[in-house]
Amino acid sequence: MRLAEVAAVTGGELHRATGDELVSSVEFDSRKVGPGALFLALPGERADGHGFAAAAVAAGASGVLAGRPVDAPSVIAPPGESYAGTDLGAADPDGAGAAVLTALGRLARHSVTTLPDLHVVGITGSSGKTSTKDLVAAVLRPLGETVAPPGSFNNELGHPWTALQAGESTRHLVVELSARGRGHIARLCRIAPPRIGVVLNVGSAHVGEFGSPEAIAQAKGELVEALPADGVAVLNTDDPRVAAMASRTKARAVGVGVGADADVRAEDVSLGAGRASFTLVTPAGSAPVSLQLVGAHHVGNALAAAAVALELGGTPAQIAEALSAATPASRWRMEVTERADGVTVVNDAYNANPESMTAALQALASIGRGRRTWAVLGPMAELGDTTEAAHRRIADTVRGLGVDRFVAVGTDHYTRESPTSDTRVPHSGHASPTPRTRESDTGPRVVADRDAALALLRAELAPGDVVLVKASRSAGLDRVADALLQELVSP
Protein backbone atom coordinates (compact mmCIF):
# COMPACT_ATOMS: atom_id res chain seq x y z
CA MET A 1 0.00 0.00 0.00
CA ARG A 2 0.98 3.61 -0.44
CA LEU A 3 1.22 5.72 2.68
CA ALA A 4 -1.77 7.71 1.45
CA GLU A 5 -3.83 4.49 1.44
CA VAL A 6 -2.70 3.72 4.99
CA ALA A 7 -3.95 7.16 6.01
CA ALA A 8 -7.29 6.59 4.28
CA VAL A 9 -7.82 3.15 5.86
CA THR A 10 -6.86 4.25 9.36
CA GLY A 11 -8.51 7.68 9.30
CA GLY A 12 -5.13 9.30 9.88
CA GLU A 13 -3.43 12.35 8.38
CA LEU A 14 -0.25 12.47 6.32
CA HIS A 15 2.60 14.32 8.00
CA ARG A 16 5.85 15.24 6.21
CA ALA A 17 4.96 12.68 3.53
CA THR A 18 3.95 12.77 -0.12
CA GLY A 19 1.67 9.77 0.31
CA ASP A 20 3.44 7.88 -2.48
CA GLU A 21 5.76 6.05 -0.11
CA LEU A 22 5.30 2.29 -0.61
CA VAL A 23 4.64 0.21 2.50
CA SER A 24 5.23 -3.56 2.34
CA SER A 25 5.40 -4.59 6.02
CA VAL A 26 4.82 -3.37 9.57
CA GLU A 27 7.31 -3.40 12.44
CA PHE A 28 7.18 -2.26 16.07
CA ASP A 29 10.87 -2.91 16.87
CA SER A 30 13.10 -0.21 15.38
CA ARG A 31 16.03 -2.65 15.40
CA LYS A 32 14.19 -4.92 12.94
CA VAL A 33 13.07 -2.26 10.49
CA GLY A 34 13.88 -2.95 6.85
CA PRO A 35 13.16 -1.33 3.49
CA GLY A 36 9.45 -0.67 2.97
CA ALA A 37 8.45 -1.06 6.60
CA LEU A 38 5.79 0.97 8.35
CA PHE A 39 7.23 1.60 11.82
CA LEU A 40 4.72 1.59 14.68
CA ALA A 41 5.58 4.33 17.18
CA LEU A 42 4.35 2.81 20.43
CA PRO A 43 5.10 3.81 24.02
CA GLY A 44 6.67 1.22 26.30
CA GLU A 45 7.80 0.85 29.87
CA ARG A 46 11.36 1.93 29.08
CA ALA A 47 11.12 3.99 25.88
CA ASP A 48 8.63 5.67 23.56
CA GLY A 49 8.72 4.56 19.95
CA HIS A 50 7.98 8.11 18.80
CA GLY A 51 11.56 8.93 19.72
CA PHE A 52 12.85 6.32 17.28
CA ALA A 53 10.82 7.48 14.26
CA ALA A 54 13.64 9.27 12.44
CA ALA A 55 16.06 6.40 13.10
CA ALA A 56 13.54 3.91 11.71
CA VAL A 57 13.20 5.88 8.48
CA ALA A 58 16.98 6.18 8.25
CA ALA A 59 17.12 2.38 8.52
CA GLY A 60 14.81 2.01 5.52
CA ALA A 61 11.26 2.43 6.81
CA SER A 62 8.92 4.06 4.33
CA GLY A 63 7.03 5.83 7.06
CA VAL A 64 5.75 5.82 10.61
CA LEU A 65 2.33 5.20 12.11
CA ALA A 66 2.30 7.61 15.05
CA GLY A 67 -0.04 9.02 17.65
CA ARG A 68 1.50 12.49 17.58
CA PRO A 69 3.74 14.40 15.12
CA VAL A 70 7.25 13.02 14.58
CA ASP A 71 10.24 14.13 12.54
CA ALA A 72 9.64 11.65 9.72
CA PRO A 73 7.21 10.80 6.90
CA SER A 74 4.23 9.50 8.81
CA VAL A 75 0.53 8.94 9.26
CA ILE A 76 -0.77 10.57 12.44
CA ALA A 77 -3.52 8.33 13.78
CA PRO A 78 -6.71 9.87 15.17
CA PRO A 79 -7.66 9.33 18.84
CA GLY A 80 -8.23 5.64 19.51
CA GLU A 81 -10.17 3.24 21.69
CA SER A 82 -9.47 2.85 25.38
CA TYR A 83 -6.91 0.16 26.13
CA ALA A 84 -7.24 0.36 29.90
CA GLY A 85 -6.52 -2.98 31.53
CA THR A 86 -4.45 -4.25 28.60
CA ASP A 87 -0.71 -4.66 28.17
CA LEU A 88 -0.48 -1.02 27.05
CA GLY A 89 -1.14 -0.17 30.69
CA ALA A 90 0.02 3.10 32.19
CA ALA A 91 2.74 3.65 29.58
CA ASP A 92 0.38 5.75 27.45
CA PRO A 93 -0.52 8.91 29.39
CA ASP A 94 -1.42 11.01 26.33
CA GLY A 95 -3.28 8.27 24.40
CA ALA A 96 -0.76 8.21 21.53
CA GLY A 97 -0.29 4.46 21.89
CA ALA A 98 -4.03 3.81 21.91
CA ALA A 99 -4.32 5.84 18.72
CA VAL A 100 -1.61 3.76 17.02
CA LEU A 101 -3.09 0.43 18.16
CA THR A 102 -6.58 1.38 17.00
CA ALA A 103 -5.22 2.45 13.62
CA LEU A 104 -3.19 -0.75 13.39
CA GLY A 105 -6.34 -2.77 14.03
CA ARG A 106 -8.15 -0.94 11.23
CA LEU A 107 -5.25 -1.57 8.88
CA ALA A 108 -5.20 -5.28 9.76
CA ARG A 109 -8.96 -5.66 9.29
CA HIS A 110 -8.75 -3.97 5.90
CA SER A 111 -5.96 -6.32 4.86
CA VAL A 112 -7.73 -9.48 6.06
CA THR A 113 -11.07 -8.61 4.48
CA THR A 114 -9.44 -8.03 1.09
CA LEU A 115 -8.24 -11.66 1.02
CA PRO A 116 -11.38 -13.62 0.03
CA ASP A 117 -9.68 -17.04 0.06
CA LEU A 118 -8.30 -16.63 3.57
CA HIS A 119 -9.61 -18.83 6.41
CA VAL A 120 -9.11 -17.26 9.84
CA VAL A 121 -8.83 -19.64 12.79
CA GLY A 122 -9.04 -18.11 16.27
CA ILE A 123 -7.91 -19.95 19.41
CA THR A 124 -8.55 -19.06 23.04
CA GLY A 125 -8.57 -20.71 26.45
CA SER A 126 -7.10 -20.28 29.90
CA SER A 127 -4.11 -22.46 29.03
CA GLY A 128 -2.65 -24.23 26.02
CA LYS A 129 -3.36 -21.49 23.45
CA THR A 130 0.18 -21.21 22.12
CA SER A 131 0.85 -24.96 21.93
CA THR A 132 -2.48 -25.49 20.17
CA LYS A 133 -1.78 -22.61 17.80
CA ASP A 134 1.47 -24.34 16.85
CA LEU A 135 -0.30 -27.67 16.33
CA VAL A 136 -3.04 -26.09 14.22
CA ALA A 137 -0.39 -24.45 12.04
CA ALA A 138 1.43 -27.76 11.71
CA VAL A 139 -1.65 -29.66 10.49
CA LEU A 140 -2.74 -26.85 8.13
CA ARG A 141 0.58 -26.21 6.38
CA PRO A 142 0.27 -29.35 4.20
CA LEU A 143 -3.12 -27.99 3.08
CA GLY A 144 -1.92 -24.55 2.00
CA GLU A 145 0.19 -21.55 2.96
CA THR A 146 -0.35 -20.84 6.63
CA VAL A 147 0.49 -17.82 8.76
CA ALA A 148 0.70 -18.16 12.55
CA PRO A 149 2.33 -15.89 15.11
CA PRO A 150 5.70 -16.58 16.70
CA GLY A 151 5.37 -17.36 20.39
CA SER A 152 2.43 -15.71 22.16
CA PHE A 153 1.57 -12.77 19.90
CA ASN A 154 -1.98 -12.77 21.21
CA ASN A 155 -2.71 -9.26 22.45
CA GLU A 156 -3.77 -5.89 21.03
CA LEU A 157 -0.39 -5.51 19.27
CA GLY A 158 0.65 -9.04 18.36
CA HIS A 159 -2.77 -10.00 17.01
CA PRO A 160 -3.07 -7.32 14.27
CA TRP A 161 0.67 -7.60 13.55
CA THR A 162 0.15 -11.31 12.82
CA ALA A 163 -2.91 -10.63 10.66
CA LEU A 164 -0.85 -8.27 8.52
CA GLN A 165 1.58 -11.08 7.67
CA ALA A 166 -1.10 -12.76 5.52
CA GLY A 167 -0.91 -12.12 1.78
CA GLU A 168 -2.70 -13.12 -1.40
CA SER A 169 -1.21 -16.64 -1.38
CA THR A 170 -2.07 -17.27 2.29
CA ARG A 171 -4.88 -19.77 2.83
CA HIS A 172 -4.90 -20.05 6.61
CA LEU A 173 -4.37 -17.40 9.27
CA VAL A 174 -4.09 -18.91 12.75
CA VAL A 175 -4.42 -16.39 15.56
CA GLU A 176 -4.29 -16.68 19.33
CA LEU A 177 -6.61 -14.50 21.42
CA SER A 178 -5.94 -13.53 25.02
CA ALA A 179 -7.99 -11.43 27.42
CA ARG A 180 -7.62 -9.70 30.74
CA GLY A 181 -11.13 -8.35 30.80
CA ARG A 182 -14.54 -8.41 29.17
CA GLY A 183 -14.59 -7.24 25.57
CA HIS A 184 -10.92 -7.89 24.82
CA ILE A 185 -11.52 -11.01 22.71
CA ALA A 186 -14.49 -9.39 20.96
CA ARG A 187 -12.22 -6.52 19.94
CA LEU A 188 -9.59 -8.90 18.56
CA CYS A 189 -12.29 -10.75 16.61
CA ARG A 190 -13.33 -7.50 14.94
CA ILE A 191 -9.75 -7.04 13.71
CA ALA A 192 -9.45 -10.49 12.10
CA PRO A 193 -12.95 -12.00 11.93
CA PRO A 194 -12.61 -15.76 12.46
CA ARG A 195 -14.63 -18.40 10.62
CA ILE A 196 -13.38 -21.18 12.88
CA GLY A 197 -13.09 -20.61 16.61
CA VAL A 198 -11.44 -22.97 19.11
CA VAL A 199 -12.09 -22.75 22.87
CA LEU A 200 -9.80 -25.05 24.84
CA ASN A 201 -10.72 -24.63 28.49
CA VAL A 202 -11.87 -22.29 31.22
CA GLY A 203 -9.40 -22.32 34.09
CA SER A 204 -8.22 -19.95 36.76
CA ALA A 205 -5.60 -17.98 34.82
CA HIS A 206 -6.23 -14.26 35.46
CA VAL A 207 -9.01 -15.07 37.92
CA GLY A 208 -7.67 -12.21 40.04
CA GLU A 209 -8.61 -9.82 37.25
CA PHE A 210 -11.86 -11.47 36.14
CA GLY A 211 -13.15 -12.32 39.59
CA SER A 212 -14.51 -15.82 38.92
CA PRO A 213 -14.33 -18.76 36.48
CA GLU A 214 -17.82 -17.81 35.29
CA ALA A 215 -16.55 -14.37 34.29
CA ILE A 216 -13.61 -16.00 32.49
CA ALA A 217 -16.04 -18.25 30.60
CA GLN A 218 -18.09 -15.23 29.62
CA ALA A 219 -14.98 -13.55 28.18
CA LYS A 220 -13.67 -16.65 26.37
CA GLY A 221 -17.09 -17.20 24.81
CA GLU A 222 -16.80 -13.89 22.97
CA LEU A 223 -14.88 -15.87 20.35
CA VAL A 224 -17.79 -18.18 19.49
CA GLU A 225 -20.22 -15.26 19.58
CA ALA A 226 -18.16 -13.61 16.83
CA LEU A 227 -18.39 -16.57 14.45
CA PRO A 228 -20.66 -16.34 11.38
CA ALA A 229 -23.56 -18.69 10.77
CA ASP A 230 -21.47 -20.69 8.28
CA GLY A 231 -18.59 -20.89 10.77
CA VAL A 232 -17.46 -23.66 13.10
CA ALA A 233 -17.00 -23.58 16.87
CA VAL A 234 -14.54 -26.24 18.06
CA LEU A 235 -15.39 -26.82 21.73
CA ASN A 236 -13.76 -29.00 24.38
CA THR A 237 -16.62 -31.20 25.57
CA ASP A 238 -14.52 -32.39 28.53
CA ASP A 239 -14.89 -28.90 30.04
CA PRO A 240 -18.55 -28.21 30.94
CA ARG A 241 -18.11 -24.43 30.78
CA VAL A 242 -16.72 -24.72 27.26
CA ALA A 243 -19.31 -27.24 26.11
CA ALA A 244 -22.05 -24.84 27.24
CA MET A 245 -20.77 -22.23 24.77
CA ALA A 246 -22.53 -24.09 21.95
CA SER A 247 -25.65 -22.15 22.92
CA ARG A 248 -23.86 -18.82 22.45
CA THR A 249 -23.01 -19.14 18.77
CA LYS A 250 -24.75 -19.16 15.41
CA ALA A 251 -21.97 -21.40 14.10
CA ARG A 252 -22.01 -25.18 13.94
CA ALA A 253 -20.44 -26.71 17.05
CA VAL A 254 -17.90 -29.55 16.85
CA GLY A 255 -17.02 -31.25 20.12
CA VAL A 256 -13.54 -32.56 20.87
CA GLY A 257 -12.41 -34.60 23.87
CA VAL A 258 -11.90 -38.03 25.30
CA GLY A 259 -15.57 -38.57 26.09
CA ALA A 260 -17.73 -40.77 23.89
CA ASP A 261 -19.97 -37.83 22.98
CA ALA A 262 -17.14 -35.88 21.29
CA ASP A 263 -17.26 -35.61 17.49
CA VAL A 264 -13.47 -35.76 17.32
CA ARG A 265 -12.04 -37.81 20.12
CA ALA A 266 -9.06 -39.75 21.42
CA GLU A 267 -9.31 -43.44 22.24
CA ASP A 268 -6.76 -45.85 23.73
CA VAL A 269 -4.65 -43.04 25.18
CA SER A 270 -1.32 -44.19 26.58
CA LEU A 271 1.67 -42.32 27.97
CA GLY A 272 5.31 -43.24 27.54
CA ALA A 273 8.19 -41.04 28.74
CA GLY A 274 5.69 -38.22 29.09
CA ARG A 275 4.50 -38.40 25.47
CA ALA A 276 0.98 -39.48 24.54
CA SER A 277 -0.17 -41.91 21.90
CA PHE A 278 -3.82 -42.41 20.97
CA THR A 279 -6.23 -43.31 18.22
CA LEU A 280 -7.73 -40.26 16.53
CA VAL A 281 -11.41 -41.00 15.93
CA THR A 282 -13.37 -38.73 13.59
CA PRO A 283 -16.55 -38.91 11.49
CA ALA A 284 -14.26 -39.34 8.48
CA GLY A 285 -12.29 -42.25 9.92
CA SER A 286 -9.56 -43.08 12.41
CA ALA A 287 -5.78 -42.99 12.52
CA PRO A 288 -3.03 -43.59 15.11
CA VAL A 289 -1.18 -40.58 16.60
CA SER A 290 2.08 -40.57 18.56
CA LEU A 291 2.85 -37.09 19.84
CA GLN A 292 6.40 -35.83 20.23
CA LEU A 293 5.18 -33.10 22.58
CA VAL A 294 5.59 -33.81 26.29
CA GLY A 295 2.49 -33.94 28.49
CA ALA A 296 -0.85 -35.74 28.44
CA HIS A 297 -2.59 -32.36 28.20
CA HIS A 298 -1.46 -32.14 24.58
CA VAL A 299 -4.01 -34.80 23.65
CA GLY A 300 -6.78 -32.22 23.94
CA ASN A 301 -4.73 -29.64 22.05
CA ALA A 302 -4.10 -32.16 19.27
CA LEU A 303 -7.79 -33.02 19.03
CA ALA A 304 -8.64 -29.34 18.60
CA ALA A 305 -6.06 -29.06 15.83
CA ALA A 306 -7.44 -32.16 14.16
CA ALA A 307 -10.98 -30.78 14.19
CA VAL A 308 -9.80 -27.57 12.53
CA ALA A 309 -7.90 -29.45 9.83
CA LEU A 310 -10.87 -31.70 9.11
CA GLU A 311 -13.02 -28.63 8.49
CA LEU A 312 -10.42 -27.28 6.06
CA GLY A 313 -10.00 -30.41 3.95
CA GLY A 314 -7.57 -32.63 5.83
CA THR A 315 -7.99 -36.40 6.06
CA PRO A 316 -7.51 -38.37 9.29
CA ALA A 317 -4.34 -39.95 7.91
CA GLN A 318 -2.84 -36.60 6.87
CA ILE A 319 -3.73 -35.03 10.19
CA ALA A 320 -2.34 -37.92 12.24
CA GLU A 321 0.92 -37.78 10.31
CA ALA A 322 1.28 -34.03 10.87
CA LEU A 323 0.42 -34.30 14.58
CA SER A 324 2.92 -37.12 15.05
CA ALA A 325 5.66 -35.10 13.37
CA ALA A 326 5.02 -31.84 15.24
CA THR A 327 7.75 -30.66 17.59
CA PRO A 328 7.71 -27.73 20.04
CA ALA A 329 7.60 -24.51 18.04
CA SER A 330 7.47 -21.88 20.80
CA ARG A 331 10.11 -21.31 23.47
CA TRP A 332 9.85 -22.28 27.16
CA ARG A 333 6.85 -24.58 26.79
CA MET A 334 7.72 -28.09 27.97
CA GLU A 335 11.12 -27.90 26.29
CA VAL A 336 12.86 -31.15 27.26
CA THR A 337 16.65 -31.16 26.95
CA GLU A 338 19.11 -33.74 28.24
CA ARG A 339 22.51 -32.47 29.30
CA ALA A 340 25.70 -34.33 28.50
CA ASP A 341 25.87 -35.57 32.10
CA GLY A 342 22.41 -37.16 31.95
CA VAL A 343 20.45 -34.45 33.78
CA THR A 344 17.16 -33.71 31.97
CA VAL A 345 15.86 -30.14 32.13
CA VAL A 346 12.19 -29.44 31.40
CA ASN A 347 11.79 -25.72 30.72
CA ASP A 348 8.11 -24.77 30.99
CA ALA A 349 8.80 -21.34 32.42
CA TYR A 350 6.88 -19.16 29.98
CA ASN A 351 3.84 -18.86 32.22
CA ALA A 352 1.86 -20.70 34.87
CA ASN A 353 -1.61 -21.16 36.30
CA PRO A 354 -3.01 -24.00 38.41
CA GLU A 355 -4.12 -26.03 35.39
CA SER A 356 -0.89 -25.73 33.42
CA MET A 357 1.16 -26.29 36.58
CA THR A 358 -0.71 -29.52 37.28
CA ALA A 359 -0.22 -30.71 33.69
CA ALA A 360 3.51 -29.97 33.83
CA LEU A 361 3.91 -31.82 37.13
CA GLN A 362 2.08 -34.86 35.76
CA ALA A 363 4.44 -34.81 32.78
CA LEU A 364 7.44 -34.59 35.15
CA ALA A 365 6.22 -37.65 37.03
CA SER A 366 5.88 -39.56 33.76
CA ILE A 367 9.24 -38.49 32.31
CA GLY A 368 11.03 -39.13 35.59
CA ARG A 369 9.66 -42.57 36.35
CA GLY A 370 12.51 -44.50 37.94
CA ARG A 371 14.66 -41.35 38.24
CA ARG A 372 14.97 -38.59 40.84
CA THR A 373 12.64 -35.70 40.05
CA TRP A 374 12.82 -32.01 40.94
CA ALA A 375 9.99 -29.46 40.79
CA VAL A 376 11.49 -25.96 40.79
CA LEU A 377 8.42 -23.74 40.97
CA GLY A 378 7.97 -20.00 41.21
CA PRO A 379 4.82 -18.01 41.92
CA MET A 380 1.63 -18.16 39.89
CA ALA A 381 0.48 -14.58 39.29
CA GLU A 382 -2.91 -12.90 38.86
CA LEU A 383 -4.89 -15.35 41.00
CA GLY A 384 -6.34 -12.72 43.34
CA ASP A 385 -7.93 -14.00 46.53
CA THR A 386 -7.33 -17.60 45.45
CA THR A 387 -3.53 -17.21 45.43
CA GLU A 388 -2.60 -19.03 48.64
CA ALA A 389 -5.17 -21.81 48.23
CA ALA A 390 -4.12 -22.41 44.61
CA HIS A 391 -0.43 -22.66 45.52
CA ARG A 392 -1.14 -25.05 48.39
CA ARG A 393 -3.17 -27.27 46.07
CA ILE A 394 -0.17 -27.42 43.76
CA ALA A 395 2.00 -28.36 46.74
CA ASP A 396 -0.46 -31.18 47.44
CA THR A 397 -0.15 -32.25 43.79
CA VAL A 398 3.65 -32.33 44.07
CA ARG A 399 3.42 -34.60 47.12
CA GLY A 400 0.69 -36.76 45.59
CA LEU A 401 2.77 -37.40 42.47
CA GLY A 402 5.76 -38.42 44.55
CA VAL A 403 8.11 -35.74 43.21
CA ASP A 404 11.40 -36.22 45.07
CA ARG A 405 12.61 -32.64 45.45
CA PHE A 406 10.43 -29.51 45.62
CA VAL A 407 12.02 -26.05 45.46
CA ALA A 408 9.87 -22.92 45.78
CA VAL A 409 11.56 -19.83 44.35
CA GLY A 410 10.67 -16.41 45.69
CA THR A 411 7.36 -17.32 47.31
CA ASP A 412 6.04 -18.77 50.57
CA HIS A 413 2.63 -19.58 49.09
CA TYR A 414 3.44 -23.25 48.50
CA THR A 415 4.10 -23.88 52.20
CA ARG A 416 1.39 -24.95 54.63
CA GLU A 417 2.98 -22.71 57.23
CA SER A 418 4.81 -19.52 56.35
CA PRO A 419 8.51 -20.14 57.04
CA THR A 420 10.36 -17.91 59.45
CA SER A 421 12.87 -15.51 58.04
CA ASP A 422 15.87 -17.72 58.86
CA THR A 423 14.59 -20.51 56.59
CA ARG A 424 15.04 -18.41 53.46
CA VAL A 425 18.15 -18.43 51.34
CA PRO A 426 19.44 -14.84 51.32
CA HIS A 427 20.33 -13.12 48.06
CA SER A 428 23.94 -12.00 48.28
CA GLY A 429 24.55 -11.06 44.67
CA HIS A 430 26.84 -14.10 44.34
CA ALA A 431 25.08 -17.25 45.43
CA SER A 432 26.78 -19.60 47.84
CA PRO A 433 27.27 -23.16 46.59
CA THR A 434 25.72 -24.42 49.84
CA PRO A 435 22.67 -22.23 50.46
CA ARG A 436 20.69 -22.48 53.66
CA THR A 437 17.35 -24.17 52.95
CA ARG A 438 14.50 -25.82 54.77
CA GLU A 439 12.99 -29.19 53.84
CA SER A 440 10.17 -30.98 55.57
CA ASP A 441 7.65 -33.71 54.88
CA THR A 442 4.89 -31.17 54.23
CA GLY A 443 6.48 -28.29 52.34
CA PRO A 444 9.08 -27.31 49.77
CA ARG A 445 12.55 -25.99 50.26
CA VAL A 446 12.05 -22.25 50.04
CA VAL A 447 14.73 -20.11 48.38
CA ALA A 448 14.67 -16.37 47.97
CA ASP A 449 15.45 -15.94 44.28
CA ARG A 450 16.86 -17.38 41.05
CA ASP A 451 20.48 -17.20 42.20
CA ALA A 452 19.67 -19.16 45.34
CA ALA A 453 17.76 -21.76 43.32
CA LEU A 454 20.72 -22.20 40.98
CA ALA A 455 23.11 -22.54 43.91
CA LEU A 456 20.97 -25.30 45.38
CA LEU A 457 20.67 -27.14 42.08
CA ARG A 458 24.38 -26.86 41.34
CA ALA A 459 25.15 -28.33 44.73
CA GLU A 460 22.72 -31.24 44.62
CA LEU A 461 21.84 -32.24 41.05
CA ALA A 462 23.13 -35.64 40.04
CA PRO A 463 23.32 -37.43 36.68
CA GLY A 464 19.96 -38.91 35.77
CA ASP A 465 17.90 -36.31 37.63
CA VAL A 466 14.91 -34.68 35.91
CA VAL A 467 14.25 -31.00 36.69
CA LEU A 468 11.01 -29.14 35.89
CA VAL A 469 11.28 -25.34 35.97
CA LYS A 470 7.95 -23.49 35.92
CA ALA A 471 6.41 -20.20 37.09
CA SER A 472 4.52 -17.20 35.81
CA ARG A 473 6.47 -15.20 33.26
CA SER A 474 7.15 -12.35 35.68
CA ALA A 475 9.31 -14.67 37.82
CA GLY A 476 11.83 -15.10 35.00
CA LEU A 477 12.64 -18.72 35.86
CA ASP A 478 13.52 -19.41 32.23
CA ARG A 479 16.92 -18.01 33.23
CA VAL A 480 17.31 -20.81 35.73
CA ALA A 481 16.59 -23.41 33.05
CA ASP A 482 18.91 -21.69 30.58
CA ALA A 483 21.71 -21.56 33.16
CA LEU A 484 21.29 -25.27 33.92
CA LEU A 485 21.67 -26.08 30.24
CA GLN A 486 24.86 -24.06 29.94
CA GLU A 487 26.76 -25.99 32.58
CA LEU A 488 27.42 -29.47 33.86
CA VAL A 489 27.27 -30.80 37.41
CA SER A 490 30.62 -30.46 39.13
CA PRO A 491 32.33 -33.85 39.67
Image (cartoon, helix red, strand yellow):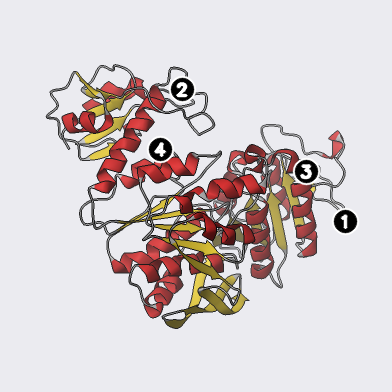
Check disc 1 and report the residue beneath it: 441
For marks 1 and 4, the one nearer the N-term is 4
Q: Quadrant of residue 71?
A: top left
Sequence order check, earlier mark of 1 and 3? 3
Label 1 sits on a secondary structure element that is loop
How packed mark 2 is, by other alpha carbons closer than 10 Å (few <14, some 14-19, many 20 or more), is some
Q: Does 321 sit left or right of 482 as displayed?
A: left
Disc 2, disc 3: CB below 8 Å? no
Foreground mark, 1 or 4?
4
Q: Secondary structure at mark 3?
A: helix
Q: Which residue is mark 4?
A: 157
Label 1 to label 4: alpha-carbon separation: 46 Å
Q: Nearer the viewer, mark 2 or mark 1?
A: 2
Compared with 436, 59 (above or below) is: above
Residue for badge 3: 388
Label placed on residue 92? 2
Mark 4 belongs to which amino acid?
Answer: Leu
User: In terms of depth relative to the viewer, which is nearer, 247 or 210?
Assistant: 247
Q: Earlier in the sequence, mark 2 or mark 3?
A: 2
